[in-house]
Image (cartoon, helix red, strand yellow):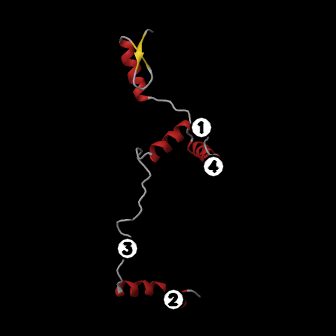
């Protein structure tokens, strides 16, 4: 297949109708090589793959999608900065909590 030039991604682009197919495939499926995977992460990904009956690749892709906030169950981190320092004393609330701390000894015989 003849090659026309390098793209801005550093990949070669084919001429003609094969070019369109190549660009679609390249856009949909990109391959990575990851190095220095921590042992604990490797063990967990392999454990999940076995438990869920999936390939290691499938489980790793799901984890990457969630971690990047792109999956259905994306990891969402919240620091509660919008409510930190806003506590107000409330005697009624304190009394209600204190009632819950009382043990009904007659129920625990």
Residue 97, above or below 59: below
Total numbered badges shown on the rendered structure? 4
- Neighbourhood count class around disc 1 (C-alpha, 10 Å): few under 14, some 14–19, many 20 upward: few
Q: Are marks 3 and 4 in contact (CB under 8 Å)?
A: no
- Residue denoted by label 1: 35
Q: Is residue 55 visible?
A: no
Name which quarter of the figure residue 12 lies in.
top left
State the image coordinates of residue 41 (x, y, percent, origin top left): 60, 47
* Mark nearer the N terminus (3 vs 4): 4
Q: Residue at x 38, y 15 (%)?
A: 19
- Residue denoted by label 2: 104
Is label 4 in a helix, a strand or a loop? Answer: helix
* Mark nearer the N terminus (3 vs 2): 3
Separation of marks 3 and 4 at Cα, in angstroms: 37 Å
- Residue denoted by label 4: 40
* Mark nearer the N terminus (4 vs 1): 1
Mark 2 or 1: in front is: 1
* Mark nearer the N terminus (4 vs 2): 4
Is label 2 in a helix, a strand or a loop? Answer: loop
- Residue denoted by label 3: 85
Q: Are marks 4 and 2 in contact (CB under 8 Å)?
A: no
Separation of marks 4 and 1 at Cα, in angstroms: 14 Å
Q: Are marks 1 and 3 in contact (CB under 8 Å)?
A: no
* Mark nearer the N terminus (1 vs 3): 1
Q: Residue at x 49, y 88 (%)?
A: 102
Separation of marks 1 and 3 at Cα, in angstroms: 42 Å
Is label 1 in a helix, a strand or a loop? Answer: loop
Residue 96, above or below 39: below
């Amino acid at each position: 297949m003849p090659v026309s030039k390098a793209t801005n991604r550093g990949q070669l682009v084919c001429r003609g109708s094969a070019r369109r197919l190549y660009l679609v495939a390249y856009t949909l499926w990109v391959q990575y090589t990851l190095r220095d995977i921590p042992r604990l992460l490797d063990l967990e990904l392999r454990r999940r793959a076995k438990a869920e009956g999936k390939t290691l690749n499938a489980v790793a892709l799901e984890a990457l999608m969630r971690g990047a906030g792109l999956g259905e169950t994306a990891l969402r981190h919240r620091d509660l900065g919008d409510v930190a320092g806003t506590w107000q004393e409330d005697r009624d609330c304190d009394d209600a909590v204190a009632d819950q701390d009382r043990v009904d000894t007659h129920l625990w015989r």
